């Protein structure tokens, strides 16, 4: 074994695919950010915990409106996903500059993203850890899937500009659905 710098631990434990989180401010302006720090915390109802940096415009919008969409992109959108993550919504219309298509959601004002294979309309249900860790707990109110993308491959951030693409799916017997 060789010692690993503690600053690199997150690269080993990255919980899931890179997603896009969209919000809409009270003034009607839509924004989108790239996010990879999230995890399921409950199955029914589906709840997701996510970290949104307090320096991001999305943090302030999410805190104020208490709603968002988590859109899950396939690997084909990787370049756009990185571009979204490398600029600020304070001075950039990310939908326009990345050619992502906002769609009207049913339960929240934040937009769905047409190019993503799944979209989850969410509301904030717990903010107790926001001040300490920037951690929001979201409840999924409505979920959408694009049947035209039946076997999407997702990307997973491993730090320093590196990503892993989903690989082969393997199955084992399970007593849990």
Image: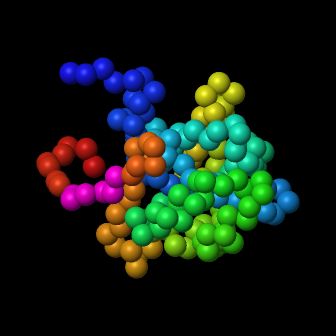
Front one among 36 and 65 = 36
- Seen in the image, is 92 located left or right of residue 165? right
Location of residue 121 in the rendering, given as x and y in whole percent from the top left corner? 59, 58
Q: Which residues are magenta?
A: 164-169
Q: Quadrant of residue 148?
A: bottom left
Is any atom of residue 85 visible in this view? yes
**In the visual, does 164 lie left or right of 108?**
left
Task: Tell me the residue at 60%/59% (across/down).
Answer: 84
Q: How many marks?
A: 0
Residue occupying image coordinates x 42% and y 69%: 76
Q: Position of residue 167 (x, y in %)?
A: 25, 57
In the rendered view, tell whether residue 127 sits above or below residue 2.
Answer: below
| Helix, strand or loop: magenta stretch | loop
| Above or below: residue 133 compared with residue 21 | above
Residue at the extreme left: 173
Give yes or no for residue 146 being in the magenta stretch.
Answer: no
Q: Nearer the viewer, residue 109 or 115?
A: 115
The answer to whether 155 is drawn above or below residue 139 in the figure is below
Task: Tell me: 95 left or right of 60.
Answer: left
Colour scheme shown = rainbow
- The answer to whether 57 appears left or right of 70 in the picture is right
Residue 165 lies in the magenta-colored region: yes
Q: Residue furthest bottom?
A: 148
- Front-most of 32 and 150? 32
Residue at the spot 70% in from the left edge and 59% down from the top edge? 31
Quarter of image, res 50: top right
Q: Position of residue 115 (x, y in %)?
A: 52, 73
- Quadrant location of the N terminus? top left
């Amino acid at each position: 074994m060789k010692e690993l710098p503690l600053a690199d631990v997150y690269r080993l434990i990255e919980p899931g695919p890179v997603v896009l989180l969209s919000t809409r401010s009270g003034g009607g302006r839509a924004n989108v950010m790239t996010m990879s720090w999230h995890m399921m915390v409950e199955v029914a109802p589906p709840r997701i915990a996510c970290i949104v940096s307090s320096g991001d415009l999305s943090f302030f919008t999410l805190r104020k409106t208490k709603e968002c969409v988590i859109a899950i992109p396939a690997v084909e959108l990787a370049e756009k996903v990185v571009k979204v993550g490398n600029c600020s919504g304070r001075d950039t219309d990310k939908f326009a500059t990345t050619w992502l298509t906002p769609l009207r959601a049913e339960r929240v004002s934040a937009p769905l993203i047409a190019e993503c294979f799944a979209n989850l309309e969410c509301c904030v249900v717990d903010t107790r850890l926001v001040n300490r860790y920037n951690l929001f707990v979201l409840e999924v109110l409505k979920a959408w899937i694009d049947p035209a993308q039946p076997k999407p491959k997702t990307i997973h951030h491993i730090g320093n500009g590196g990503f892993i693409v989903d690989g082969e799916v393997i199955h084992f017997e399970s007593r849990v659905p």
